Amino acid sequence: MNIFETIESEVRSYCRSWPAVFDKASGSWLKDENGKEYLDFFAGAGALNYGHNNPVLKEALLDYLSGDGVTHALDMNTVAKRDFLEAFSDIVLKPRGLDYKVQFPGPTGANSVESALKLARKITGRESVISFTNAFHGMTLGALAVTGNSMKRGGAGIPLVHATPMPYDNYFEGQYPDFLYFERLLEDAGSGLNEPAAVIVETVQGEGGVNVARPEWLRGLAELCQRHDMLLIVDDVQMGCGRTGPFFSFELAGIQPDIVTLSKSISGYGLPMALTLIKPELDQWEPGEHNGTFRGNNPAFVTAATALRTYWNDDLLEKSTLAKGEQLGTVLQEIADANPGVEARGRGLARGLAFEQPELAGKVCAAAFARGLLMETSGPQSEVVKLLPPLTLTDEELTQGIELLTASVRSVLK
Ligand code: PMP
């Protein structure tokens, strides 16, 4: 169905299938052009952790624009950039004892992944990369190479980066010791794999079906990287900026990746922005080796700095995310316990409900849409209902979302 019948020629035919034309957005809510309101448990696929048109960020942005602040500045030094870097260092890095250089790799998460892969290959002089089953890292050729879903390649053929998919945590449901397969391949000279440049991993696979890696598995992976001189890249594009509770999703495991990718909610306002964090001794970029026109999105620097100062000067957001996540997780577990073939997954406010019969997930999302709740499916067969509400949602909104979700599941499984 094309709901833009009058302007068919101008519109992609593969939009998200929600049959609505959205018009306004505020906090945890979207409104369509007919005035119907939707509680947004999709939140820009994790790009809107602080909700739509967050009033504090909006005020900072409007002030900046009305004062003729620089908007576009490539990689030039600007006051807004310096202010963001100071806030990032003081509020995010220093209190966590983390030391990273910050690169602005381009506007999107995929840009950050590309820069991470390029840098790892440049530093190590090695070519191959280890990635994981069901991983998602973006739509550019390098990022697709490490994405564990061949459908996403869209017929584009064999990617440019040599990547080997390895089993993610619990892939074999506990039947094999962690990392046995890795170690064998790494030590087998004939596997062609003996010297990968890096391992790229999500601590929770969002697009892959809300698959949660255990902290001990992540620690084991970090040790494996050290033993084999591989760089550890954590892709925190979707799970960073507090989605799982702490600012970085890897904090829970107590690991310090060599390179971190961040995007989606870093600008706080849904404006394109990405960061690649690089351990200082690994920053071997020469000027011009990784550049791009939209690396200096200054309005995004302004909202990003404001978001850090508003939400990360204390641990309130982290605590409320964990508490709300627990509440949502308990309800999902109750649904799973009451319905065979349903499994609850997740951490913090990244939650999922997986269905043994894949088509049920889409039906639940459609039923929820009709009731005014937006959620998406994820997973290799779109078998998981993914819930990513704004972290700033109120208790009432969480209760309302839970009621709508429960009613939607009931209507489908009845
Ligand atoms: N990495 C992860 C973990 C992601 O979830 C995504 C987007 N869903 C990306 C990278 C790519 O980000 P973008 O769409 O901004 O290029």
Image (cartoon, grey):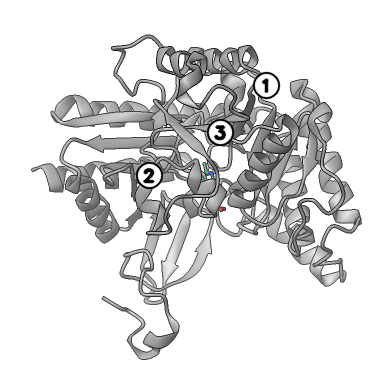
Q: Earlier in the sequence, mark 2 or mark 1?
A: 2
Residue 286 x %, y %:
86, 45
Of helix, strand and loop, which one carries label 1?
A: loop
Q: Is residue 108 shown above or below 406?
A: below
Q: Amino acid at mark 3?
A: Val
Q: Which residue is mark 1?
A: 256
Q: Residue at x 73, y 62 (%)?
A: 294
Q: Which residue is mark 3?
A: 129
Give the residue at the far left of this rendering: 414
What quarter of the picture does the N terminus occupy? Answer: bottom left
Q: Distance between the Cα atoms at labels 1 and 3?
A: 19 Å
Q: Which residue is mark 2?
A: 149
342 sits left or right of 219 in the view:
left
Q: Nearer the viewer, mark 3 or mark 2?
A: 3
Q: Amino acid at mark 2?
A: Asn
Question: Depth check: 185 or 210 in front?
Answer: 185
- Badge 3: how crowded within 10 Å, few (<14), some, or many (20+)? many
